[in-house]
Image: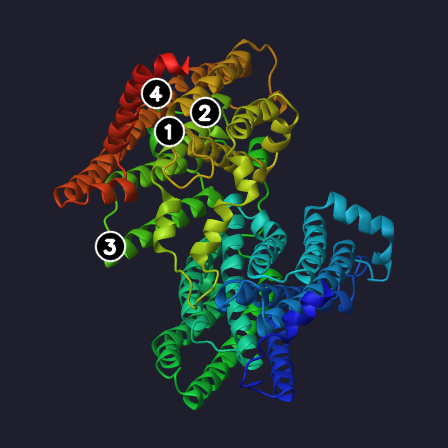
């Protein structure tokens, strides 16, 4: 391993050398830190988040905790964003003619190991100061192991910070062993996941529309991290001496997506926290939101400048070394200024998280509101089930993103003049519509309240929506539209997707027995164990169940009727057999719920005190009956889809054989019969040769039969 690392670190050092001296980079880092720290101080003072002396007799954490807590959060955020950017640059932004990382990408990954270490230390310090802040004691007393253990195990915010710290350590270990672009891709995904835990707590977790607030903040954080981190990775590559001609266009596309994502999610999150338009100009929090909006507009202007000048000039002057180097120098100067604004914006966001919101934390007035995160809805009617909605931000974000990505793929194919079946498009958006209704629509609303509605939503997510999604061939669309290698030998995005499809985890998951076990076994493992009440009593537990149903359903029906490439392609009869094997297990599950005299989660539904459907056991048995009845419809749809695919496959094979026979016949007419039979034998030629061989064998047997005996 050490020899490989030495080879990688010495391989293909850029001919141009470093673009800027180390002293200039250090001065820029110091200036950026000074600007970000100054913005944080101003925001804390202006927004009311600065430490204030406590009234006499009340515990006081002290000035050190009041200032060090947001400062440690700022350092953690910047370290995490930088780590993600360095890994992202090595994985997908910078072109690589070989899979093994070379020079700048490799050194960037090794630098990411150090920034991940800083990330861990900053989060660890934040844990100590958070304990001090919550208890109102000096930070020295927060060093008590008992307090630390209680904080990280019993308090949601403590658990989130502890998980992030552990994931940062894991990320550093993974990045330490990365030598290829595939490894850098895995590390990039892990870095994204490491950014998520703190977004699940804080202001958003206490907001009125809990799931919408948390989901919008999570999308906001991930979009901003990809944007800022990606630019930081490009600047690192440029300063290190690597070319940007291929990397900047790809980042420009990513930055556009991130800009839209950050803008939309920011509006949604600010709306939840502000409550109305009035506090936008009358509260300190609203003024800071406007300042953050102005920073976003400035960053959008930087992005527009890059798209209209940098991208074209880097490509046009790439053949001239002096011109290309000057363009890279201009890019670095502008990008460095952009990063300063981004760092200041991150500091503003940290200060904003310490600023009291106009809406404030929601005090739930009933047990139902405490469990649901919203008021108990009225009795269900057909209109409420069809037209109602609930702010399920996670699935709404998933549905919107999936719809936009598919639309972009269709637009790309249309620009190339490549046709795409209309039926697949209709199938995709119909599947997304089912997902939206079962999670954020009226059915999704009552799935939190009634077990019968929960079962209908479960059936739609696991047995109806997946059929439409897999028949839409999204992976095939991605393979046709994702960019390929930018330089010879590069592992492009399309090749990365193909590598995932042929990886050993996908091969295992697409084994029929494995998919059957996951699809059916998860029913019994979820509903007949303590896992179901545990998930129902958590705000994010319901989201986890929804995503699980949808994921397992898509996997199962991908094996059965999926159009996309599958490492385990089975004969139609075998797929029908797999479906028939699954039917009894699903039917028995529904019958078991119908005949059960025990509530699966009686405590949760009893705590809602709903004035309708008061017989909890009858509602549960109704859910089992609905599950039994609805299971027949997807089965018929799948059988019909398999039959249609079978017929179409036969037609395609027949046309292929006809074309082969026609080509052979043309060669015969030209007098090349022997060559045709030898080079490209068709089925008819092989069959005639087989008959001729049988006839020759029979004549030989009649002639030499007595002697052979």
Answer whether labels 1 and 2 touch (C-beta < 8 Å): yes
In this image, 560 relative to 170: left or right?
A: left
Q: CA distance from mark 3 to mark 4?
A: 34 Å
Q: Element under label 4?
A: helix
Which residue is at the front of the view, 214 or 662?
Answer: 662
Q: Element under label 1?
A: helix
Reading the image, the residue beneath label 4 is: 636
Q: CA distance from mark 1 to mark 4?
A: 25 Å
Quarter of the image for residue 105 reads bottom right
Vertical placement of residue 355 versus 433, above or below? below
Q: Quadrant of the N terminus?
A: bottom right
Q: CA distance from mark 2 to mark 3?
A: 40 Å
The mark that comes first in sequence, 1 or 2, is 1
Q: Nearer the viewer, mark 2 or mark 3?
A: 3
Q: Residues within 10 Å of mark 3 (few under 14, many from 20)?
A: few
Reading the image, the residue beneath label 3 is: 414
Label at residue 184: none
Reading the image, the residue beneath label 2 is: 453
x and y percentages locating residue 143 in the rendered image: 85, 57
Label at residue 385: 1
In this image, 346 relative to 576: left or right?
A: right
Q: Residues within 10 Å of mark 2 (few under 14, many from 20)?
A: many
Vertical placement of residue 574 versus 389, above or below? above
x and y percentages locating residue 416 in the rendered image: 25, 58
């Amino acid at each position: 391993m050490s020899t490989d690392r030495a080879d990688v670190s010495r391989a293909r050092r850029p001919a141009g050398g470093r673009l800027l001296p180390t002293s200039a980079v250090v001065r820029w880092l110091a200036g950026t830190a000074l600007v970000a720290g100054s913005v944080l101080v101003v925001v804390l003072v202006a927004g009311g988040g600065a430490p204030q002396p406590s009234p006499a007799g009340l515990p006081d954490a002290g000035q050190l905790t009041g200032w060090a807590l947001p400062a440690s959060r700022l350092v953690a955020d910047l370290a995490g964003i930088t780590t993600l950017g360095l890994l992202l640059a090595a994985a997908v932004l910078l072109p690589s003619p070989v899979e093994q990382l070379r020079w700048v990408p490799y050194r960037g990954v090794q630098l990411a190991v150090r920034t991940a270490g800083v990330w861990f230390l900053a989060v660890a310090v934040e844990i100590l100061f958070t304990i001090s802040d919550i208890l109102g004691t000096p930070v020295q007393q927060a060093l008590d192991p008992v307090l630390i253990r209680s904080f990280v195990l019993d308090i949601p915010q403590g658990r989130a910070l502890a998980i992030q710290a552990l994931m940062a350590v894991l990320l550093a270990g993974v990045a330490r062993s990365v030598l290829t672009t595939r490894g850098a891709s895995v590390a990039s995904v892990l870095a994204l996941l490491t950014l998520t835990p703190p977004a699940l707590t804080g202001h958003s977790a206490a907001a009125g529309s809990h799931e919408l607030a948390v989901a919008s903040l999570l999308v906001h954080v991930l979009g901003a991290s990809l944007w800022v981190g990606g630019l930081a990775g490009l600047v690192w590559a440029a300063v290190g001496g690597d070319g940007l001609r291929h990397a900047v266009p790809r980042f420009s596309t990513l930055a556009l997506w991130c800009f839209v994502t950050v803008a939309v999610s920011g509006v949604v999150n600010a709306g939840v926290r502000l409550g109305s338009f009035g506090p936008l100009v009358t509260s300190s929090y609203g003024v800071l939101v406007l300042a953050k909006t102005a920073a976003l507009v400035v960053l959008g202007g930087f992005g527009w400048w890059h798209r209209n000048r940098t991208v074209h000039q880097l490509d046009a002057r790439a053949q001239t070394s002096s011109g290309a180097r000057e363009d890279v120098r201009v890019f670095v100067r502008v990008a460095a200024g952009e990063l300063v604004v981004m760092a200041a914006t991150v500091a503003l966001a940290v200060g904003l998280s310490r600023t009291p919101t106009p809406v404030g934390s929601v005090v739930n007035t009933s047990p139902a509101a405490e469990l649901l995160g919203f008021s108990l809805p009225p009795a269900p009617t057909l209109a409420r089930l069809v037209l109602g909605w609930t702010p399920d931000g996670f699935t709404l974000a998933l549905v919107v993103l999936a719809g936009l990505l598919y639309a972009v793929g269709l637009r790309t194919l249309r620009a190339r003049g490549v046709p795409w079946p209309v039926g697949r498009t209709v199938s995709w958006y119909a599947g997304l519509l089912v997902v939206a209704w079962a999670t954020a629509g009226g059915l999704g609303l009552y799935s939190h309240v009634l077990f019968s509605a929960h079962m209908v939503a479960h059936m739609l997510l696991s047995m109806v929506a997946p059929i439409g999604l897999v028949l839409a061939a999204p992976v095939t669309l991605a393979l046709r539209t994702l960019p390929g290698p930018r330089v010879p030998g590069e592992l492009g995005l399309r090749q990365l997707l193909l590598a995932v499809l042929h990886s050993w985890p996908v091969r295992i998951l697409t084994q029929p027995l494995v998919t059957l076990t996951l699809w059916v076994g998860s029913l019994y493992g979820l509903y007949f164990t303590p896992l179901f009440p545990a998930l129902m009593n958590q705000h994010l537990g319901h989201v986890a169940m929804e995503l699980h149903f949808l994921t397992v359903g898509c996997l199962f029906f991908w094996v059965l009727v999926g159009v996309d490439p599958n490492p385990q392609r089975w004969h139609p009869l075998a797929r029908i057999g797999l479906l028939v094997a699954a039917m009894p297990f699903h039917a028995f599950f529904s019958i078991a719920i119908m005949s059960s005299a025990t509530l699966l989660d009686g405590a949760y539904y009893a705590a809602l005190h709903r004035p309708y459907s008061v017989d909890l056991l009858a509602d549960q048995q109704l859910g089992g009956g609905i599950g039994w009845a609805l299971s027949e419809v997807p089965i018929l749809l799948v059988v019909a889809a398999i039959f249609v695919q079978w017929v179409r496959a036969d037609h395609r094979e027949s046309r292929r054989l006809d074309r082969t026979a026609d080509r052979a016949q043309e060669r015969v007419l030209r007098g090349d019969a022997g060559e045709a039979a030898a080079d490209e034998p068709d089925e008819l030629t092989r069959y005639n040769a087989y008959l001729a061989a049988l006839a020759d064998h029979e004549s030989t047997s009649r002639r030499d039969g007595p002697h052979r005996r």
